[in-house]
Image (cartoon, rainbow, N blue to C red):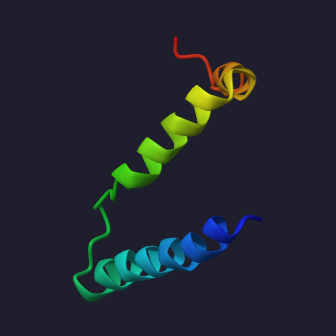
Amino acid sequence: MSQLSDKTLPVARESQDDIAQLERAFSLQNWRYVDIDRQERLAGILNRWPLLAEWAAESQPEVS
C-alpha cells in the first residue's frame, strides 16, 4: 500500500465508527447513510481503470 492509502484508511474506519455510534445512540434503524466521498473516490478509480469499470458493470445484477 502507498503511504497515502495508509494514512486515509484509519480516517475511513473512524468515520464508519462515528456513523455506527450515531445509529446506536439515536436508534436509527431505518436510516441509510450515503458516503458521498467514497462514491466520488470509486467513480475516479473506475475512470482511471476502464477494464475495472467494465468488470464492475458486468458484475452488477440485472434490473428487470
Q: Position of residue 11 (x, y in %)?
A: 48, 76
Q: Quadrant of residue 1?
A: bottom right
Q: In this view, does 55 lie to the left or right of 32?
A: right
Q: Where is residue 44 in the image (x, y as percent from the top left)?
A: 51, 37
Residue drawn at the location 35% of the way across and 50% of the way down:
36
> Observer-nearest residue: 15 or 4?
4
Residue drawn at the location 63% of the way across and 26% of the way down:
60
Q: Position of residue 20 (x, y in %)?
A: 40, 78
Q: In the current view of this chain or complex, which residue is farthest to the front?
A: 3
Residue drawn at the location 46% of the way across and 52% of the way down:
38
Q: Position of residue 13 (x, y in %)?
A: 53, 77
Q: In which quarter of the image is residue 30?
A: bottom left
Count of all numbered marks drawn on residues in the image: 0
Q: In this view, does 49 lie to the left or right of 35?
A: right
> Observer-nearest residue: 11 or 22?
11
> Observer-nearest residue: 36 or 47?
47
> Observer-nearest residue: 45 or 27?
45
Q: In the current view of this chain or complex, which residue is farthest to the top?
A: 64
In this view, 52 is above or below 24: above
Q: In this view, does 62 lie to the left or right of 39?
A: right
